[in-house]
Amino acid sequence: MEENIFEQRTDLTALRNSVQLIRHEIGKVIVGQQQMLDLLMIGLLSDGHILIEGVPGVAKTLTAKLLAKVVDVDFSRIQFTPDLMPSDVMGTSVFNPREGSFNFKAGPVFSNIVLIDEINRAPAKTQSALFEVMEERQVTVDGITHEMRFPFLIVATQNPIEQEGTYRLPEAQLDRFLFKIEVKYPSLQEEIDILMRQQGRPQQELLEGISKVLAPAELRQYRNLMQAIVVEQKLLGYIAAIVNETRNNAALYLGASPRASLSILRAAKANAAIKGRDFVIPDDIKEMVTPVLRHRIVLTPEKEMEGVTPDELIETILREVEVPR
Protein backbone atom coordinates (compact mmCIF):
# COMPACT_ATOMS: atom_id res chain seq x y z
CA MET A 1 0.00 0.00 0.00
CA GLU A 2 2.80 2.44 0.85
CA GLU A 3 4.18 2.23 -2.69
CA ASN A 4 0.99 3.71 -4.19
CA ILE A 5 0.77 6.82 -1.99
CA PHE A 6 2.58 8.99 -4.55
CA GLU A 7 1.35 7.25 -7.67
CA GLN A 8 0.69 9.79 -10.44
CA ARG A 9 -3.07 10.15 -11.00
CA THR A 10 -3.18 13.13 -13.36
CA ASP A 11 -1.31 13.28 -16.67
CA LEU A 12 0.68 16.52 -16.65
CA THR A 13 2.89 15.72 -19.65
CA ALA A 14 1.32 18.26 -22.01
CA LEU A 15 1.45 20.99 -19.35
CA ARG A 16 5.12 20.33 -18.59
CA ASN A 17 5.98 20.30 -22.30
CA SER A 18 4.24 23.65 -22.77
CA VAL A 19 6.11 25.16 -19.81
CA GLN A 20 9.44 23.93 -21.19
CA LEU A 21 8.63 25.38 -24.63
CA ILE A 22 7.66 28.74 -23.09
CA ARG A 23 10.93 28.82 -21.15
CA HIS A 24 12.83 28.00 -24.35
CA GLU A 25 11.10 30.69 -26.44
CA ILE A 26 11.43 33.46 -23.85
CA GLY A 27 15.03 32.35 -23.23
CA LYS A 28 15.83 33.34 -26.82
CA VAL A 29 15.54 36.97 -25.70
CA ILE A 30 15.74 37.06 -21.88
CA VAL A 31 18.92 35.97 -20.11
CA GLY A 32 18.44 34.67 -16.56
CA GLN A 33 15.46 35.93 -14.50
CA GLN A 34 14.25 32.34 -14.09
CA GLN A 35 12.37 33.05 -10.87
CA MET A 36 10.41 35.90 -12.47
CA LEU A 37 9.54 33.70 -15.45
CA ASP A 38 8.47 30.75 -13.28
CA LEU A 39 6.28 32.97 -11.09
CA LEU A 40 4.67 34.54 -14.17
CA MET A 41 3.79 31.09 -15.48
CA ILE A 42 2.45 30.05 -12.06
CA GLY A 43 0.37 33.24 -12.03
CA LEU A 44 -0.99 32.39 -15.48
CA LEU A 45 -1.96 28.88 -14.33
CA SER A 46 -3.40 30.20 -11.04
CA ASP A 47 -5.43 33.01 -12.63
CA GLY A 48 -3.61 35.56 -10.47
CA HIS A 49 -2.42 39.11 -11.18
CA ILE A 50 1.24 39.95 -10.63
CA LEU A 51 3.12 42.98 -9.33
CA ILE A 52 6.76 43.26 -10.44
CA GLU A 53 9.12 45.59 -8.61
CA GLY A 54 12.56 46.38 -9.95
CA VAL A 55 14.81 49.18 -11.14
CA PRO A 56 14.50 50.28 -14.79
CA GLY A 57 16.21 48.12 -17.39
CA VAL A 58 15.86 44.65 -15.84
CA ALA A 59 13.42 43.38 -18.53
CA LYS A 60 10.16 43.68 -16.56
CA THR A 61 8.19 45.11 -19.49
CA LEU A 62 9.91 42.94 -22.09
CA THR A 63 9.14 39.72 -20.21
CA ALA A 64 5.43 40.59 -19.98
CA LYS A 65 5.35 41.28 -23.73
CA LEU A 66 7.07 37.97 -24.45
CA LEU A 67 4.61 36.09 -22.24
CA ALA A 68 1.70 37.45 -24.30
CA LYS A 69 3.54 36.53 -27.50
CA VAL A 70 4.13 32.88 -26.57
CA VAL A 71 0.62 32.40 -25.14
CA ASP A 72 -1.01 33.68 -28.38
CA VAL A 73 -3.26 36.27 -26.74
CA ASP A 74 -3.81 40.02 -27.08
CA PHE A 75 -1.49 42.36 -25.22
CA SER A 76 -1.91 45.98 -24.18
CA ARG A 77 0.30 48.36 -22.28
CA ILE A 78 -0.92 51.25 -20.12
CA GLN A 79 1.55 53.84 -18.87
CA PHE A 80 0.19 55.15 -15.57
CA THR A 81 0.68 58.88 -15.00
CA PRO A 82 -0.58 61.34 -12.34
CA ASP A 83 -3.19 62.80 -14.74
CA LEU A 84 -4.62 59.43 -15.84
CA MET A 85 -8.38 59.16 -15.38
CA PRO A 86 -10.40 55.95 -14.79
CA SER A 87 -12.06 56.35 -18.20
CA ASP A 88 -8.61 56.37 -19.85
CA VAL A 89 -8.14 52.82 -18.55
CA MET A 90 -11.64 51.30 -18.50
CA GLY A 91 -13.30 53.09 -21.38
CA THR A 92 -16.23 55.46 -21.63
CA SER A 93 -19.64 55.94 -23.24
CA VAL A 94 -19.48 58.04 -26.41
CA PHE A 95 -22.54 59.73 -27.92
CA ASN A 96 -23.40 58.61 -31.44
CA PRO A 97 -25.37 61.49 -33.05
CA ARG A 98 -26.46 59.33 -35.99
CA GLU A 99 -28.17 56.79 -33.74
CA GLY A 100 -28.99 59.25 -30.97
CA SER A 101 -27.54 56.92 -28.31
CA PHE A 102 -24.42 56.31 -26.27
CA ASN A 103 -22.03 53.53 -27.32
CA PHE A 104 -19.39 52.07 -25.03
CA LYS A 105 -15.82 52.53 -26.27
CA ALA A 106 -13.62 49.98 -24.50
CA GLY A 107 -10.40 51.16 -22.89
CA PRO A 108 -6.97 49.47 -23.10
CA VAL A 109 -7.73 47.25 -20.07
CA PHE A 110 -9.92 45.17 -22.43
CA SER A 111 -7.19 42.79 -23.49
CA ASN A 112 -5.80 39.43 -22.32
CA ILE A 113 -2.45 40.31 -20.79
CA VAL A 114 -2.42 43.93 -19.63
CA LEU A 115 0.88 45.50 -18.65
CA ILE A 116 0.48 48.49 -16.32
CA ASP A 117 3.77 50.36 -16.22
CA GLU A 118 4.56 52.28 -13.02
CA ILE A 119 1.20 51.49 -11.42
CA ASN A 120 2.00 53.64 -8.38
CA ARG A 121 2.08 56.86 -10.45
CA ALA A 122 -1.71 57.11 -10.90
CA PRO A 123 -3.94 58.77 -8.25
CA ALA A 124 -6.33 56.93 -5.92
CA LYS A 125 -9.40 57.39 -8.16
CA THR A 126 -7.72 55.54 -11.04
CA GLN A 127 -6.31 52.88 -8.70
CA SER A 128 -9.78 52.20 -7.28
CA ALA A 129 -11.16 51.72 -10.79
CA LEU A 130 -8.96 48.62 -11.07
CA PHE A 131 -10.57 46.89 -8.05
CA GLU A 132 -13.58 45.50 -9.90
CA VAL A 133 -11.73 44.36 -13.02
CA MET A 134 -8.97 42.66 -10.98
CA GLU A 135 -11.38 40.79 -8.72
CA GLU A 136 -14.46 40.18 -10.89
CA ARG A 137 -12.91 40.18 -14.40
CA GLN A 138 -15.54 42.69 -15.47
CA VAL A 139 -16.04 46.45 -15.83
CA THR A 140 -19.25 48.32 -15.01
CA VAL A 141 -19.77 51.63 -16.86
CA ASP A 142 -23.06 53.56 -16.68
CA GLY A 143 -24.71 50.59 -15.00
CA ILE A 144 -23.79 48.16 -17.80
CA THR A 145 -21.39 45.30 -17.06
CA HIS A 146 -18.79 44.31 -19.65
CA GLU A 147 -17.07 40.94 -19.20
CA MET A 148 -13.35 40.49 -19.87
CA ARG A 149 -12.22 37.86 -22.36
CA PHE A 150 -10.40 34.73 -21.24
CA PRO A 151 -7.63 34.79 -20.14
CA PHE A 152 -7.26 38.06 -18.24
CA LEU A 153 -4.03 38.83 -16.42
CA ILE A 154 -2.72 42.15 -15.13
CA VAL A 155 1.05 42.46 -14.84
CA ALA A 156 1.93 45.72 -13.05
CA THR A 157 5.38 47.20 -12.54
CA GLN A 158 6.78 49.72 -10.10
CA ASN A 159 10.19 51.24 -9.42
CA PRO A 160 11.38 50.86 -5.78
CA ILE A 161 13.85 53.74 -6.01
CA GLU A 162 12.17 56.71 -7.68
CA GLN A 163 9.32 57.65 -5.33
CA GLU A 164 8.72 61.31 -6.29
CA GLY A 165 5.25 61.79 -7.75
CA THR A 166 4.07 58.30 -6.74
CA TYR A 167 1.13 57.11 -4.64
CA ARG A 168 1.30 54.20 -2.25
CA LEU A 169 -0.99 51.42 -3.46
CA PRO A 170 -3.94 50.77 -1.09
CA GLU A 171 -3.64 47.58 0.95
CA ALA A 172 -6.94 46.34 -0.54
CA GLN A 173 -5.45 46.61 -4.03
CA LEU A 174 -2.15 44.99 -3.06
CA ASP A 175 -4.14 42.08 -1.63
CA ARG A 176 -5.56 41.43 -5.11
CA PHE A 177 -2.13 40.68 -6.55
CA LEU A 178 -1.21 37.00 -6.31
CA PHE A 179 2.54 37.73 -6.25
CA LYS A 180 4.94 40.57 -5.79
CA ILE A 181 8.10 39.65 -7.70
CA GLU A 182 11.28 41.51 -6.82
CA VAL A 183 13.61 41.56 -9.82
CA LYS A 184 17.32 41.87 -9.09
CA TYR A 185 20.21 42.92 -11.32
CA PRO A 186 21.68 40.15 -13.50
CA SER A 187 24.90 38.47 -12.44
CA LEU A 188 28.18 39.44 -14.13
CA GLN A 189 28.08 36.40 -16.42
CA GLU A 190 24.43 36.99 -17.30
CA GLU A 191 25.21 40.59 -18.23
CA ILE A 192 28.06 39.43 -20.46
CA ASP A 193 25.63 36.99 -22.13
CA ILE A 194 23.13 39.85 -22.67
CA LEU A 195 25.80 41.97 -24.34
CA MET A 196 26.96 39.10 -26.56
CA ARG A 197 23.40 38.26 -27.61
CA GLN A 198 22.50 41.87 -28.43
CA GLN A 199 25.76 42.34 -30.30
CA GLY A 200 24.97 39.38 -32.55
CA ARG A 201 21.35 40.27 -33.41
CA PRO A 202 19.22 43.36 -32.72
CA GLN A 203 16.43 42.93 -30.15
CA GLN A 204 13.64 43.41 -32.72
CA GLU A 205 15.02 40.53 -34.76
CA LEU A 206 15.14 38.36 -31.64
CA LEU A 207 11.51 39.23 -30.85
CA GLU A 208 10.38 38.29 -34.35
CA GLY A 209 11.89 34.84 -33.83
CA ILE A 210 9.54 34.04 -30.91
CA SER A 211 6.98 31.32 -31.67
CA LYS A 212 3.49 30.96 -30.22
CA VAL A 213 3.34 27.98 -27.85
CA LEU A 214 0.06 28.00 -25.94
CA ALA A 215 -3.50 28.64 -27.16
CA PRO A 216 -6.19 30.01 -24.78
CA ALA A 217 -8.11 26.71 -25.02
CA GLU A 218 -5.05 24.80 -23.81
CA LEU A 219 -4.54 27.27 -20.96
CA ARG A 220 -8.15 26.75 -19.87
CA GLN A 221 -7.55 22.99 -19.90
CA TYR A 222 -4.39 23.36 -17.79
CA ARG A 223 -6.21 25.57 -15.27
CA ASN A 224 -8.88 22.89 -14.94
CA LEU A 225 -6.10 20.39 -14.19
CA MET A 226 -5.13 22.48 -11.14
CA GLN A 227 -8.30 21.23 -9.43
CA ALA A 228 -6.93 17.67 -9.60
CA ILE A 229 -3.67 18.52 -7.78
CA VAL A 230 -3.84 16.79 -4.38
CA VAL A 231 -3.14 18.72 -1.17
CA GLU A 232 -3.17 16.69 2.05
CA GLN A 233 -5.07 18.10 5.02
CA LYS A 234 -1.92 18.49 7.09
CA LEU A 235 -0.50 20.76 4.35
CA LEU A 236 -3.65 22.87 4.41
CA GLY A 237 -3.01 23.21 8.14
CA TYR A 238 0.59 24.22 7.38
CA ILE A 239 -0.57 27.04 5.07
CA ALA A 240 -3.09 28.23 7.66
CA ALA A 241 -0.45 28.16 10.44
CA ILE A 242 1.97 30.30 8.39
CA VAL A 243 -0.67 32.92 7.59
CA ASN A 244 -2.02 32.88 11.14
CA GLU A 245 1.48 33.55 12.47
CA THR A 246 1.59 36.82 10.48
CA ARG A 247 -1.49 37.98 12.43
CA ASN A 248 0.05 37.23 15.81
CA ASN A 249 3.60 38.43 15.19
CA ALA A 250 4.71 41.36 17.36
CA ALA A 251 6.87 42.70 14.53
CA LEU A 252 3.88 43.12 12.21
CA TYR A 253 1.35 45.95 12.18
CA LEU A 254 -0.79 44.15 9.57
CA GLY A 255 -0.93 40.42 8.91
CA ALA A 256 -2.14 38.51 5.85
CA SER A 257 -5.81 37.92 5.00
CA PRO A 258 -7.59 34.64 4.14
CA ARG A 259 -7.12 35.65 0.50
CA ALA A 260 -3.39 35.14 1.13
CA SER A 261 -4.01 31.55 2.33
CA LEU A 262 -6.01 30.81 -0.82
CA SER A 263 -3.29 32.40 -2.95
CA ILE A 264 -0.58 30.21 -1.38
CA LEU A 265 -2.75 27.15 -2.00
CA ARG A 266 -3.39 27.99 -5.68
CA ALA A 267 0.25 28.89 -6.30
CA ALA A 268 1.56 25.75 -4.57
CA LYS A 269 -0.68 23.59 -6.77
CA ALA A 270 0.61 25.28 -9.93
CA ASN A 271 4.19 25.04 -8.63
CA ALA A 272 3.78 21.29 -8.17
CA ALA A 273 2.19 20.92 -11.61
CA ILE A 274 4.99 22.63 -13.55
CA LYS A 275 7.42 20.31 -11.77
CA GLY A 276 5.40 17.32 -13.00
CA ARG A 277 3.70 16.33 -9.74
CA ASP A 278 -0.03 16.02 -9.15
CA PHE A 279 0.46 16.41 -5.39
CA VAL A 280 1.81 19.26 -3.27
CA ILE A 281 4.80 18.85 -0.95
CA PRO A 282 5.94 21.30 1.78
CA ASP A 283 8.66 22.74 -0.50
CA ASP A 284 6.01 23.83 -3.02
CA ILE A 285 4.37 25.85 -0.25
CA LYS A 286 7.65 27.27 1.11
CA GLU A 287 8.69 28.51 -2.35
CA MET A 288 5.39 30.39 -2.78
CA VAL A 289 5.07 31.94 0.69
CA THR A 290 7.48 34.88 0.21
CA PRO A 291 6.19 36.18 -3.16
CA VAL A 292 2.59 35.76 -1.95
CA LEU A 293 3.05 37.47 1.44
CA ARG A 294 5.74 40.14 0.97
CA HIS A 295 3.27 42.79 -0.27
CA ARG A 296 0.46 41.80 2.09
CA ILE A 297 2.18 42.32 5.44
CA VAL A 298 3.09 45.64 7.04
CA LEU A 299 5.94 45.88 9.55
CA THR A 300 5.67 47.98 12.68
CA PRO A 301 7.42 51.39 12.46
CA GLU A 302 10.02 50.15 14.98
CA LYS A 303 11.00 47.18 12.81
CA GLU A 304 11.12 49.35 9.69
CA MET A 305 13.49 51.75 11.45
CA GLU A 306 15.69 48.78 12.39
CA GLY A 307 15.95 47.95 8.68
CA VAL A 308 14.05 44.65 8.85
CA THR A 309 12.53 43.68 5.49
CA PRO A 310 9.29 41.75 4.89
CA ASP A 311 11.29 38.93 3.27
CA GLU A 312 13.48 38.53 6.38
CA LEU A 313 10.43 38.39 8.62
CA ILE A 314 8.73 35.81 6.39
CA GLU A 315 11.87 33.65 6.53
CA THR A 316 11.76 33.87 10.34
CA ILE A 317 8.11 32.77 10.35
CA LEU A 318 8.89 29.83 8.04
CA ARG A 319 11.63 28.70 10.43
CA GLU A 320 9.28 28.91 13.42
CA VAL A 321 6.26 27.11 11.94
CA GLU A 322 6.66 23.34 12.13
CA VAL A 323 6.77 21.56 8.78
CA PRO A 324 4.35 18.59 8.61
CA ARG A 325 5.94 15.16 8.29
Image (cartoon, helix red, strand yellow):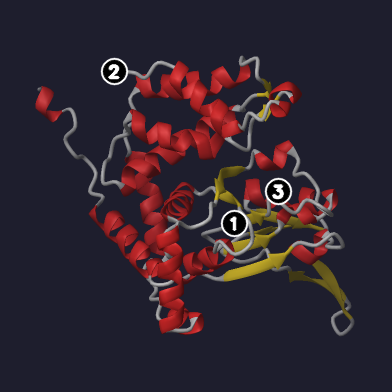
Near mark 1 (Cα within 10 A), the count class, few <14, some 14-19 or many ≥20, is many
Residue 46 placed where, x, y %? 46, 46
User: Residue beneath label 1, please?
Assistant: 155
Q: Looking at numbered disc 2 in the image, what kind of residue is underneath it?
A: Arg
**Marks 2 and 3, the one that precedes in the sequence:** 3
Q: Looking at numbered disc 1 in the image, what kind of residue is underneath it?
A: Val
Near mark 3 (Cα within 10 A), the count class, few <14, some 14-19 or many ≥20, is few
Residue 13 placed where, x, y %? 23, 54
User: Residue beneath label 2, please?
Assistant: 325
At a point 50% along the width and 82% down the height, the residue shown is 204
Residue 211 placed where, x, y %? 38, 76
Can residue 129 be seen in the rendering of this structure?
no
- How far apart marks 1 and 2 lie (CA) works out to 36 Å
Q: Is residue 141 above or below residue 173?
A: below
At a point 48% along the width and 58% down the height, the residue shown is 186
Locate the N terminus and report the quarter of the image it occupies.
Answer: top left
Q: Nearer the viewer, residue 222 or 147?
A: 222
